[in-house]
Image (cartoon, rainbow, N blue to C red):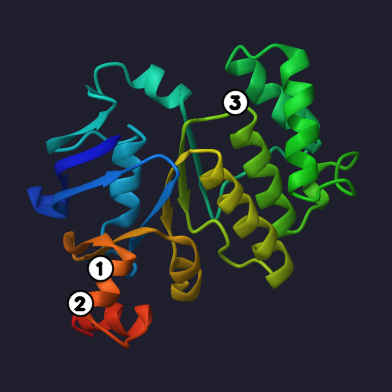
Amino acid sequence: MLEIKNVSKNFVLPKKKIKQAVNDVSFEVNPGRIYGLLGPNGAGKTTTLRIIGTIFSPSMGDVIFKGESVFGDPVAHRKRLGFISGNTGVYDRLNPKEIATYFGSLNEIPRKTIDERFERISEMLDMKDLLGKQCSKFSTGEKQKVSIARMMISDPEILILDEPTLGLDVITSRTIVDFINDSKKNGKYIILSTHIMSEAEYLCDDVGIIHKGDLKFNGTLEALHGKYPGESLEKVFFNLIGE
């Protein structure tokens, strides 16, 4: 189990002002289930995800994975984690296989394993037309496929997906949604942040709705609909954030 326990994060602004980005947030992510962290811009989603990824340290609270704090050995935690966002960069002068091989070698994965995994991943993401091209020639959606291949080459246990379909066409978005569902079937721990409520409704098992740093709801999607019968996730979302 991945546990986010009473996490708060404060940032020091100019003139020593304090901004609280996340306030006492707690939730759990279980293998083979997708946790959707939903909220408007500035709600604290990305800060929370970066704390889970040990990019930020919390001002208070902790992140526990399988009974141990991830901050005890953040390097080891990052090796079992894959993190992508809607604007994850790729190396323009390299092709997809070169990028995947480079990141696989950083994680000390044998070359034979890299080759086997990349063949499987590239087929899953429908990348056959991209393999011999430099990434500088790719569209936004094609670069996102490369980012996912790079992330998955190390076969991470935990996937943090921050707006993974942002700005993509419907066909590429469908491919990435299928990939997320396949990762769920393979027992990954998955945290998904998205502004697309229909996507969250389709993919997520559990949801947290965050606004101004506070978690307004945390539970299963079924429980949320039970609390607000007959209402769409989008309508419930706006009711909870009060806008």
Residue 234 in the image: x percent, y percent? 37, 81
Q: State which tag comes first along the sequence, 3 or 2.
A: 3
Q: Quadrant of the N terminus?
A: top left
Q: Which residue is pictured at 90% across the width and 49% down the height?
A: 129
Q: Which mark is residue 154?
A: 3
Above or below, 159 against 170 in this view is above
Q: Tell which of 231 and 56 is nearer to you.
A: 231
User: Which residue carries the number 2 mark?
Assistant: 227
Along the polypeptide, which appears first: circle 3 or circle 1? 3
Position of residue 165 in the picture relative to residue 49 (left or right): right
Residues at discs 2 and 1 in contact (Cβ within 8 Å): yes
- Any part of residue 130 in sight: yes
- The residue carrying pointer 2 sits among few (fewer than 14), some (14 to 19) or many (20 or more) residues within 10 Å by Cα, namely few
Is residue 113 shown above or below 214?
Answer: above
Residue 164, picture quadrant: bottom right
Q: Is residue 87 above or below residue 41?
A: above
Residue 223: mark in rendering: 1
Task: For label 3, count other residues whose C-alpha is less than 10 Å away and answer few (under 14), some (14-19) or many (20+).
Answer: many
Residue 152 shown left or right of residue 233 in the figure: right
Q: Amino acid at mark 3?
A: Ser
Dot 2 amino acid type: Lys
Q: Nearer the viewer, residue 188 or 89?
A: 188
